Image: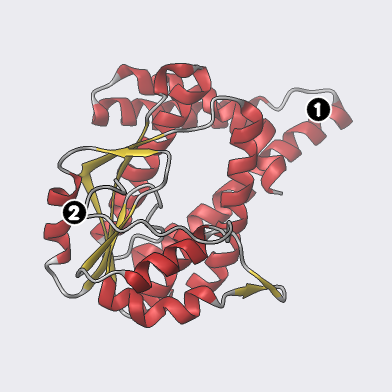
Amino acid sequence: FARDPRFNILLLPQNVGKRKAQIAAIRRSAGDMVLNVDSDTILASDVIRKLVPKMQDPAVGAAMGQLTARNRNDSWLTRLIDMEYWLACNEERAAQARFGAVMCCCGPCAIYRRSALASLLDQYESQYFRGKPSDFGEDRHLTILMLKAGFRTEYVPSAIAATVVPNKLGPYLRQQLRWARSTYRDTLLGLRLLPNLHRFLTLDVVGQNLGPLLLALSVLTGLAQLALTGTVPWLASLMIVAMTMIHCSVVALRARQRRFLGFSLHAFINIFLLLPLKA
């Protein structure tokens, strides 16, 4: 690419992290749109053609494409993560986009209006958390700043980006911990935006944060019952199983793919690994 005159490769003197690399590139850019692609991601050939029409509306500041696992067939975990990405895009992001505010335009494939970015870069660069410069959660924070500036954010399901996902539990749990930190921190910032957004988004944000808490409470209550009384918490267990199977069945019907019935296995990862980790 360095030999192609259409490309301008920026080599920074040292590894300064994703945020400062983004800012350096954006400040050197000249086009109307800025496309952000993570280094482990391959875009479908028509991604830009699919994303740009959304940006013709001047009220839209950013749009993201649909993510898939590029290494989906590596292991049972990568297959589960691929389904997890489908759900995150085609349930969560699609619903948020219906009401004008995708709360996190994901890094593997997101397009931004450069004029909007230019006005936000100083805030983006100078973010502090607990007195220290922030070095995580770039995608979510940049989206929050875009919404705070009054722009809409969109989701385009036909713009497909394939990204490498963790194929072992250790890296996957570390990734989820980083994302959880970003979600909890920037949710505090996002709460101030909710009165100006559609009421569904308030329900969505509250549900995303209270849902895991209520699930954890159910699990702890069941374990306490088992430890103190020696009786199995059948009601709580059956409720969790029923909700999981109903959800996976509805998704399998919507996607017309039976593989989503297997996503019920992710419930064990969620309950016994992700919930304690996020706590």
Q: Is residue 52 left or right of residue 234?
A: left
Q: Is residue 192 above or below residue 60?
A: below
45 or 264, which lies in front? 45
The x and y percentages for residue 102 are 34, 60
227 or 229, which lies in front? 227
Q: Quadrant of the N terminus?
A: top left
Q: Residue furthest toward the front?
A: 3
The x and y percentages for residue 22 are 43, 63
Circle 1: element type: helix
Q: Amino acid at mark 2?
A: Leu
Q: Is residue 137 left or right of residue 112?
A: right
Q: Is residue 178 above or below residue 193?
A: above
The alpha-carbon separation of the residues under discs 1 and 2 comes to: 52 Å
100 or 107, which lies in front? 107
Within the image, what quadrant is residue 245 found in?
A: top left
Q: Residue at x 64, y 41 (%)?
A: 174
Q: Is residue 33 above or below residue 110?
A: below
140 or 205, which lies in front? 140
Q: Residue at x 53, y 65 (%)?
A: 187
Within the image, what quadrant is residue 41 found in?
A: top left
Q: Residues within 10 Å of mark 2 (few under 14, many from 20)?
A: many
The residue carrying mark 1 is 226
Q: Residue at x 21, y 68 (%)?
A: 31
Task: State which tag comes first along the sequence, 1 or 2.
Answer: 2
Q: Nearer the viewer, mark 1 or mark 2?
A: 2
Q: Is residue 260 left or right of residue 185?
A: left
| Residue 167 visible, this orientation | yes
Q: Residue at x 47, y 81 (%)?
A: 122
Q: Residues within 10 Å of mark 1 (few under 14, many from 20)?
A: few
Q: Residue furthest toward the right?
A: 228
The x and y percentages for residue 258 are 32, 17
The residue carrying mark 2 is 51
